[in-house]
Image (spheres, rainbow, N blue to C red):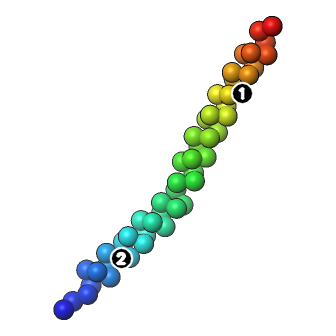
Amino acid sequence: MDHTPFIVGSYAIGAIVLLWTAVAPLIKKKAIVRDIARLIQIEERNDSNP
């Protein structure tokens, strides 16, 4: 019995998990920065209108 497909599959799954753990925070950071910028714009508009 050849175990090569199982070994390659487990390495592929491991690589995908490691890649996702590296990329997911970057995606979340981009969304958070966008939300903060939007909130700043809203507050600036509210501050300028008495």
State the residue at coordinates (38%, 70%). 13
Mark 1 and mark 2: Cα distance apart in space: 45 Å
30 versus 17 height, above or below? above
Q: Amino acid at mark 1?
A: Ile
Above or below residue 18? Residue 32 is above
Q: Earlier in the sequence, mark 1 or mark 2?
A: 2
Q: Position of residue 26 (x, y in %)?
A: 57, 51
Looking at the rendered image, the quarter that the N terminus falls into is bottom left
Image position, residue 19 (x, y; %): 48, 63
- Residue shown at the point (42%, 72%) measured from the top left: 14
Q: Nearer the viewer, residue 43 or 27?
A: 43
Disc number at residue 30? none
Q: Residue at x 52, y 62 (%)?
A: 21
Q: Quadrant of residue 12?
A: bottom left
Image quarter of residue 9:
bottom left
Residue under pointer 2: 10
Secondary structure under tag 1 reads helix
Q: Quadrant of residue 34?
A: top right
Residue lying furthest top: 50
Residue topped by disc 1: 40
Residue drawn at x 54%, y 61% is 22
Residue 38 spot, x, y in % from top left? 64, 28
Q: Which quadrant is the C terminus positioned in?
A: top right
**Position of residue 10 in the picture relative to residue 25 (left or right):** left
Q: Position of residue 36 (x, y in %)?
A: 67, 34
- Can you say whether 22 is above or below 32 in the image? below
Residue count near mark 1 (Cα–Cα under 10 Å), binned few <14, some 14–19, many ≥20: few
Within 10 angstroms of label 2, few (less than 14), some, or many (20 or more) residues?
A: few
